[in-house]
């Protein structure tokens, strides 16, 4: 099945290392790299690495981009061999930066709000997506300034009744509006995002699972996966609640871990796996991502190793 990813607020993701991060003085960095980023783009990168973009058009990337940084984003996407459709905007594409501090092992992440998008620009993206008739749509990432908070909800409403599995991975009011629309196939908030959504703290995985099942039963989403960092993850679906503990692995970067999780789950479903099987692939991809430095995301061999390890967990 064809997969279309939508990235309303993409970024050029920069990553580097420094011995120490401190104010005022120049900080010399090393091992710089630049990757095309933003939720949907990262999901597409994961799917491509897992073999789903081997035929042209199997994975299409739709994104907003503008200015000199938008041209650089186009170039980076072409280097990754992704089938892309750019929605031109007048403002510049944002640039993010992740700095790994060697002395402490900590990562510092700097993420701008993004461009100001006008109505004609976001409407062009909406019109393109609303023509989809089958396959998957993965709408992932934040909404840039100027885009209505219910954009993903409107998108889900436009695709309701069609043979399109809609995946939404965002947070805050944008996620709340999409869930209120209902009919989503998969959402994947972090525990913090999920608690903010429902307005209360959840003490453990069991409580997370119960709250997630309420969303499934109400028809808001068929699958609700909640990532809980070093405590693992929870999946609620029609068959019940699945709780998986996290694997103990060396963490190099959290950048793109959530996107890799979503990409892994979609990969599992595309393979014909059931919910439990797709969840295992999602956890494997998310775990593999934190083992990669900077903005590198997950690699297939590491994903398969983590998938095997989760079978014994």
Image: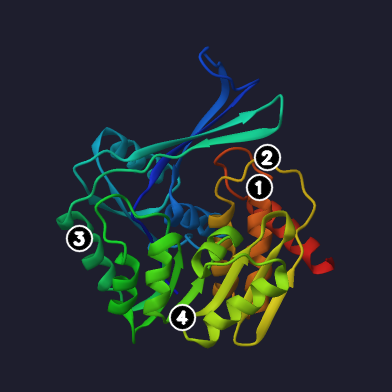
Q: Earlier in the sequence, mark 1 or mark 2?
A: 2
Residue topped by disc 4:
220
Within-10-Å neighbours for mark 4: few <14, some 14–19, many 20+: many
N-terminal-most mark, 4 or 2: 4
**Element type at marker 2?**
loop
Mark 2 touches mark 3? (CB < 8 Å): no
Residue 76 versus residue 222: which sits nearer the camera?
222
Label 3 environment density (alpha carbons within 10 Å; few <14, some 14–19, many ≥20): some
Q: Nearer the viewer, mark 3 or mark 4?
A: 4
User: Which residue is painted at 55% across and 16% down in the image?
Assistant: 27
Q: Which residue is mark 2?
A: 252
Q: What kind of colouring is applied to the model shown?
A: rainbow
User: In what element is the residue under mark 1?
Assistant: helix
The mark that comes first in sequence, 3 or 4, is 3
Which residue position is annotated with label 3?
A: 124
Distance from the alpha carbon under mark 2 to that under mark 3: 38 Å
User: Which element carries disc 3, helix, strand or loop?
Assistant: helix
Crowding near the residue tagged with mark 2, few <14, some 14–19, many ≥20 C-alpha atoms within 10 Å = some
- Using the image as rendered, state which of residue 197 and residue 94 is in the foreground: 197
Quarter location, residue 306: bottom right
Res. 58 in view:
no
Relative horizontal placement of residue 101, taking residue 4 as reference (left or right): right
Question: Disc 3 and disc 1: Cα gap in Å?
Answer: 35 Å
**C-alpha distance separating marks 1 and 2:** 6 Å
Q: Residue at x 61, y 61 (%)?
A: 191
Instruction: Work out how far the residue at label 1 is from the one at label 4, CA to CA, in angstroms.
Output: 30 Å
Residue occupied by mark 1: 290
Quadrant occupied by the N terminus? bottom left
Q: Can you give x and y, in whole percent of width and height, for residue 147 in the image?
A: 26, 57
In the picture, residue 113 is in which quadrant?
Answer: top left
Helix, strand or loop for disc 4: loop
């Amino acid at each position: 099945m064809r997969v279309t990813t939508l990235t309303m607020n993409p970024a050029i993701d920069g990553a580097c290392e420094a011995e120490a991060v401190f104010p005022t003085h120049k900080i010399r960095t090393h091992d710089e790299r630049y990757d095309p980023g933003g939720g949907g783009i990262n999901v597409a990168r994961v799917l491509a690495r897992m073999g789903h973009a081997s035929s042209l058009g199997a994975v299409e990337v739709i994104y907003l981009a503008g200015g000199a940084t938008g041209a650089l984003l186009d170039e980076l996407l072409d280097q990754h061999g992704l089938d892309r459709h750019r929605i031109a905007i007048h403002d510049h594409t944002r640039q993010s930066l992740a700095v790994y501090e060697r002395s402490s092992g900590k990562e510092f992440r700097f993420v701008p709000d993004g461009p100001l998008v006008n109505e004609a620009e976001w409407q062009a993206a909406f019109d393109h997506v609303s023509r989809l008739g089958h396959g998957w749509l993965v709408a992932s990432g934040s909404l840039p300034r100027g885009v209505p908070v219910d954009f993903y909800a409107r998108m889900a409403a436009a695709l309701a009744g069609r043979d399109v599995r809609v995946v939404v991975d965002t947070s805050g009011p944008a996620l709340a509006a999409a869930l209120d629309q209902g009919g989503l196939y998969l959402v994947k908030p972090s525990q913090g995002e999920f608690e903010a959504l429902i307005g209360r703290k959840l003490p453990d995985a069991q409580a997370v699972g119960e709250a997630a099942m309420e969303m499934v039963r109400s028809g808001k989403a068929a699958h609700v996966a909640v990532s809980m960092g070093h405590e693992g993850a929870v999946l609620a679906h029609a068959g019940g609640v699945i709780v998986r503990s996290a694997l103990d692995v060396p963490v190099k970067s959290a950048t793109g871990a959530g996107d890799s999780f979503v990409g892994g789950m979609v990969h599992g479903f595309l393979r014909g796996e059931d919910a439990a099987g797709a969840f295992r692939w999602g956890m494997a991809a998310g775990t593999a991502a934190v083992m990669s430095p900077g903005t590198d995301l997950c690699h297939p061999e590491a994903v398969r190793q983590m998938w095997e390890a989760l079978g014994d967990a």
